Image: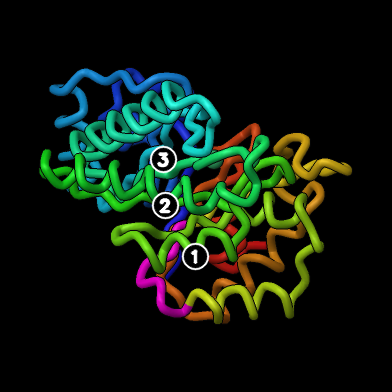
Amino acid sequence: MLRIGPAGYPEGSRTPADAMRKVSEAGLDALEVQFVRDVRFNPERAEEARREAEARGVTLSVHAPYYINLNSASQATVGKSEAWALRAMRGAEAFGAWVVVVHAAMYGDDREGATRNVIGALRRIRRAAEEEGLRAAIGLETMGRRAAWGTLAEIRTVMEEVEGVLPVVDFAHLQARGPPLDRERLDTLLTDLADVPRLHCHLSGIEGGDAGERRHLRLGEGLDHRMVLDALRRSGREATVICESPAPMEDARAIRRYLDGGG
Ligand SMILES: [Zn+2]
């Protein structure tokens, strides 16, 4: 079963709970709460949204701030990054979101040590989260820029070392980083992830260049979303697909229509 929803609240949402209603009334069943610039929420509003989402069967995820870099040469930045991730996990707990999506790191000057540093930081984050009773999984996103840490192989290595860590498959990023996705590559990728119980994915159009990802585009631009959705369907996997295009609601509905056989 594929769950589909937008990144962020639909335009015109008066409250987070209202956003859940709008998503559900549009025939969608997932939403990613965007804490990408800051983790700010009103606990009562979050609780209201949690109940509304639960009642309507809308699965929630949270996107952590973009500033996180668990491989920074600066210990202060690593410390701040761990604090950001933990705050995003508190947000996830408040909203009842099951996974926190994280852009883990940049290679910087330490490409060799990056994976080890990410593992160390994630262990500390998990330990602190456990002490606070925060239950969300940490989702490491496959990154589109070649300067960013986060290939599927790197994420896999971390998953073997740290509990409670999952991959977040951003198909547009995979496409931009290359090699371009085709039917065979998609099937291999999804087979390799057969042991991941619940797959969390991002989908949009994409503009790439020599350095990888340039920017997200509308659905269908730079990546054949139907090919991706067909592969997900073929895999028979339980998966959530969050649409991160510049028009996330409209394009999430287009994904739903395609899956429902409406082209
Ligand atoms: Zn992301």
C-alpha separation, residue under disc 1 versus residue under disc 3: 26 Å
Which residue is drawn at the image coordinates 68% and 50% (left, top)? 173
Establish if 164 lies above or below 96: below
Q: Secondary structure at mark 3?
A: strand
Q: Quadrant of the N terminus?
A: bottom left
Picture coordinates of residue 119, whole percent (x, y): 41, 52
Query: Of the residues tagged 1 and 3, which is closer to the observer?
Result: 1
Identity, as a three-letter code, of the amino acid under mark 1 = Thr
Q: Do the CB atoms of the residues marked 2 and 1 lie less than 8 Å apart? A: yes
Q: Is residue 216 left or right of residue 210?
A: left
Q: Quadrant of ligand 1?
A: top right
**Residue 143 % position (x, y):** 63, 47
SS state under label 1: helix
Within the image, what quadrant is residue 62 found in? top left
Earlier residue among tags 2 and 3: 3
Quickly name the residue at label 3. 32
In the visual, does 125 lie left or right of 32? left
**Does 31 lie within the magenta span?**
no
Q: Is residue 249 visible?
A: no
Query: The C terminus lies in which quarter of the figure?
Result: bottom right
Q: Which label sits on residue 169?
A: none
Tell me the tag on residue 119: 2
CB within 8 Å, label 1 to label 3: no
The residue that label 1 is drawn on is 157
* Crowd band around label 1 with a 10 angstrom C-alpha radius: few (<14), some (14–19), many (20+): few
* Circle nearer the N terminus (2, 1): 2
The percent coordinates of residue 51 (x first, y second) are 15, 40
State which region is magenta: 194-200
